[in-house]
Image (cartoon, rainbow, N blue to C red):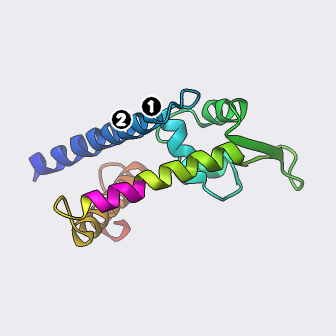
């Protein structure tokens, strides 16, 4: 069990890095040099929503990097627009600009292309659904372990 647990952790990290390379390759093929792969994924996850930086962080769209820095760079490069919340002047809301929406569509096309390529022999929807279930359980366990330390109450997982 320990070997499988540790291999899962290594695989999650490796898959994340590999996927970032896939996004980087897509940006490079399109000649896009003013946004990096992490920022591209943040942009994709924003989609058509209007979010605060805090909401990006809480939803996990930051991908382990500095959200404020990445948002600022995307605003500077014209991918996001931002405005102060009318209800809370301390809060800044961000959404995709026209340039950001164009990149979102390009990344969405990449995902669609991946779906047509993955289906014929790499994996099935059932396999992916099973993986999601296992990873969500692991996520709940890690959240509980972070809150309760080494003695995770089974009812929290």
Residue for badge 1: 28
- The label number, if any, that marks residue 72 in the structure image: none
Q: Residue at x 24, y 64 (%)?
A: 119
How many numbered badges does the structure rendering display? 2
Residue for badge 2: 21
Q: Is residue 28 left or right of residue 139?
A: right
Label whose residue precedes the other's in the sequence (1 or 2): 2
Q: Check the image and report above or below for 36 versus 89.
A: above
Name the quadrant of the C terminus.
bottom left
Q: Is residue 73 left or right of residue 35?
A: right
Q: Check the image and report above or below for 12 versus 70.
A: below
The residue positioned farthest toward the top in the image shown: 33
Say which of 97 and 137 sits in front: 97
- Magenta stretch, residue numbers: 111-117
Residue 57 visible to the viewer: no
| Residue 109 percent location from the top left of the image | 46, 54
Quarter assignment of residue 26: top left
Q: How many neighbours does mark 2 have within 10 angstroms: few (below 14), some (14-19), or many (20 or more)? A: some
Question: What is the CA distance from the residue labelled 1 to the residue labelled 2?
Answer: 10 Å
Q: Residue at x 37, y 67 (%)?
A: 156
| Residue 37 percent location from the top left of the image | 47, 35
Q: Residue at x 78, y 43 (%)?
A: 82
Say which of 138 and 51 sits in front: 51
| Residue 89 percent location from the top left of the image | 88, 46
Given contact means CB atoms under 8 Å apart, are the residues at marks 1 and 2 in contact?
A: no
Label 2: element kind: helix
Q: Is residue 139 left or right of residue 58?
A: left
């Amino acid at each position: 069990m320990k070997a499988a647990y540790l291999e899962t952790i290594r695989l999650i990290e490796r898959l994340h890095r590999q996927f970032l390379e896939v996004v980087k390759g897509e940006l490079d093929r399109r000649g896009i040099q003013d946004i990096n792969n992490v920022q591209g994924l943040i942009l994709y996850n924003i989609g058509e929503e209007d979010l605060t930086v805090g909401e990006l962080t809480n939803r996990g769209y930051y991908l382990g990097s500095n959200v404020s820095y990445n948002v600022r760079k995307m605003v500077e490069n014209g991918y996001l627009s931002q405005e102060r919340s009318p209800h809370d002047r301390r809060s800044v809301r961000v959404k995709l600009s026209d340039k950001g929406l164009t990149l979102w569509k390009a990344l969405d096309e990449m995902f669609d292309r991946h779906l047509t390529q993955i289906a014929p022999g790499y994996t099935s929807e059932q396999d992916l659904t099973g993986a999601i279930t296992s990873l969500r359980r692991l996520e709940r366990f890690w959240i509980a372990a972070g809150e309760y330390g080494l003695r995770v109450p089974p009812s929290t997982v």
